[in-house]
Image (cartoon, helix red, strand yellow):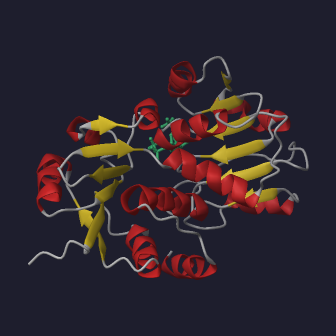
Amino acid sequence: MTNIHYKKAAVIGYPVRQSLSPLMHQHWMRQMGIEGEYEAIEVAPEYLGAFVLEAKKIGLSGFNVTVPHKTEILQYLDKIAPLARQIGAVNTVKITPDGRLTGYNTDSLGLVTHLKSIAPDFPHDRPALILGAGGAARAAALGMLGENIPMVMISNRTRSKAEAIAADVGRGRMVVVDWHARSEAVVAAGTVINTTSLGMVGQPPLSFDLSGAAKDTVIYDIVYKPLETALLNQAKSLGLRTVDGLGMLVHQGAAAFKIWFGETVAFDAELRIKLEAAL
Ligand code: ATR
């Protein structure tokens, strides 16, 4: 007999073995007394459609979506939340008992929630400077445009991608900064957010000079492996406030948990210890 109280959720990606999401969601399920499981499922791109059928059949409450499926998943959804449509990427899918799929993007909320939890008084009188122009940059741009700041500057090696984001979501409140001028732009920024993969384990370092930053500037790196990137290290040595990438991961996860199970969960010390040990 099926146990209707037994909840199942998952994260899909390719590869997905390195994902910290199972640890995090299992922690919360136990904490909230939700009987069930959350697993990482490796889904090759050609099997994405087959996975969606299977997910309905086995009664998943929902699933997280990571690289490389965040855009491809859109074609399988019955409904897409407005923010996810604007970002053009879905990281959370909810499946209702009638088998209908709704896509959300909780990256944007996760990024801003974490920033505000660490630096609630981040400078609101100066622009944010976003480095990168991938899906994470788009989520960061939309999140920061929702805050009460004058505008968002965006800089990317491939300038045309930054221009596309500014044109799509900027509504006149985004400017593109040339990649070669990124260090000069720091002078005007209140918040700096690295969304590129630079500085991550196995990737080249991010060459970026923070010496022109005002003392109250907040430096946020969404890379969490390593937890203290060279960028954050440089910021600390200059006495600037820093925000690491682990919290964004956790807060996007908490928002997904709420969507599936209706429960509000927190980034508690025990979870941080578990995640840091698993990094
Ligand atoms: P995500 O969806 O997670 O944001 P992505 O779409 O792969 O990931 O984006 C990676 C970002 O890192 C891009 O902004 C990329 O710049 P390009 O658009 O020019 O490719 C940036 N990036 C990756 N390697 C880089 C490098 N060696 N120098 C500068 N930027 C780099």
Residue drawn 57% across the image and 69% down it: 266
Q: Quadrant of residue 261?
A: bottom left
Q: How many marks?
A: 0
Q: Position of residue 248 (x, y in %)?
A: 57, 57
Image quadrant occupied by the N terminus: bottom left
**Nearest the camera: 140 or 278?**
140
Q: Is residue 95 above or below residue 83?
A: below
Residue drawn 63% across the image and 53% down it: 113
Q: On the picture, is 207 further left or further right than 126?
A: left
Q: Position of residue 225 (x, y in %)?
A: 54, 66
Q: Is residue 153 above or below residue 198?
A: above
Q: Quadrant of residue 258?
A: bottom left
**Nearest the camera: 92 or 46?**
92
**Nearest the camera: 45 or 99?**
99
Q: On the picture, is 31 further left or further right than 213?
A: left
**Nearest the camera: 229 or 23?**
23
Q: Quadrant of residue 119?
A: bottom right
- Quick one: which residue is furthest to the left in this view? 1
Q: Is residue 238 above or below residue 141?
A: below
Residue drawn 64% across the image and 35% down it: 146
Q: Position of residue 228 (x, y in %)?
A: 66, 66
Q: Position of residue 205 (x, y in %)?
A: 61, 54
Q: On the picture, is 103 further left or further right than 148?
A: left
Residue drawn 84% across the image and 62% down it: 237
Q: On the picture, is 136 further left or further right than 155?
A: left
